[in-house]
């Protein structure tokens, strides 16, 4: 029987969670038992936003979008959000065909992580899908101003402007 000190760091109930621990948990998560590992990581340190995001990705890949949404809703309530959970929740809602519900989360992700060029692009695509073309163009204009070298965003904006 393993002793407490022979257990991997992230298996110890009293251990602090670090990035390396999350990577090891994610490696274990590639196996069917990995879902429980990530759930344990979230239980040990509820402030660990990446663990929520990765757990939700696994849930989504397994076809359980409702569980992914619940996991991500817990993550967006964290006291120090970085935007990743908001973005992932927005994507989950889009996958469920709920673009209007997704837009506020995608907008918040864009606000929280302004350095992520893909976040405003995804927001604009959700806005477009929801029939909010002018909002999408405004979002893309802001994104191009912030990320002038992002060719994909610029291309989508030019495409939208060409289809008046």
Image: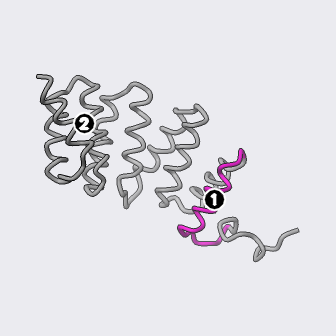
Q: Position of residue 158 (x, y in %)?
A: 16, 35
Q: Please give the name of the residue rendered at 69% of the width and 69% of the height, measured from the top-left corner.
A: 12
Q: Is disc 2 in contact with disc 1, using a CB cutoff of under 8 Å?
A: no
Sequence order check, earlier mark of 2 and 1: 1
Q: Dot 2 corresponds to which residue?
A: 124
Q: Is residue 27 magenta?
A: yes
Question: Which residue in the rendered view is the most extreme toward the right?
Answer: 1
**Nearer the observer, 118 or 107:** 118
- Figure quadrant of residue 131: top left
What's the residue at 27%, 57% (across, down)? Answer: 115
Q: Rounded to the nearest whole Å, what is the CA distance between mark 2 and mark 1? A: 33 Å
Residue 153 lies in quadrant? top left
Which stretch is magenta? 13-32
Mark 1 neighbour density, 10 Å: few (under 14) some (14–19) many (20 or more): many
In terms of secondary structure, where does tag 1 sit?
A: helix
Q: Position of residue 81 (x, y in %)?
A: 37, 57
In the displayed structure image, the side of residue 7 where residue 57 appears, left or right: left
Q: Vertically, is 74 above or below 47?
A: above
Write down the residue under mark 1.
25
Q: For the N terminus, give its image quadrant.
A: bottom right
Left or right of 103, for residue 35 = right
Residue 141 numbered tag:
none
- Colour setting: one colour
């Amino acid at each position: 029987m393993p002793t407490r000190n022979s257990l991997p760091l992230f298996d110890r109930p009293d251990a602090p969670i670090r990035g390396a621990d999350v990577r090891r948990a994610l490696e274990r998560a590639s196996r069917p038992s990995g879902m429980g590992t990530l759930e344990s990581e979230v239980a040990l340190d509820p402030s660990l936003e990446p663990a929520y995001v990765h757990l939700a990705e696994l849930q989504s890949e397994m076809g359980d979008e409702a569980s992914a949404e619940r996991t991500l809703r817990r993550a967006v309530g964290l006291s120090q959000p970085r935007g990743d959970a908001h973005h992932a929740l927005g994507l989950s809602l889009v996958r469920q065909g709920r673009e209007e519900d997704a837009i506020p989360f995608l907008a918040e992700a864009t606000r929280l992580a302004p350095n992520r060029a893909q976040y405003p692009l995804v927001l604009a695509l959700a806005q477009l899908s929801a029939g909010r073309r002018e909002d999408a163009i405004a979002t893309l204009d802001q994104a191009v101003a912030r990320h002038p070298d992002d060719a994909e965003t610029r291309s989508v904006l030019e495409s939208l402007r060409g289809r008046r």
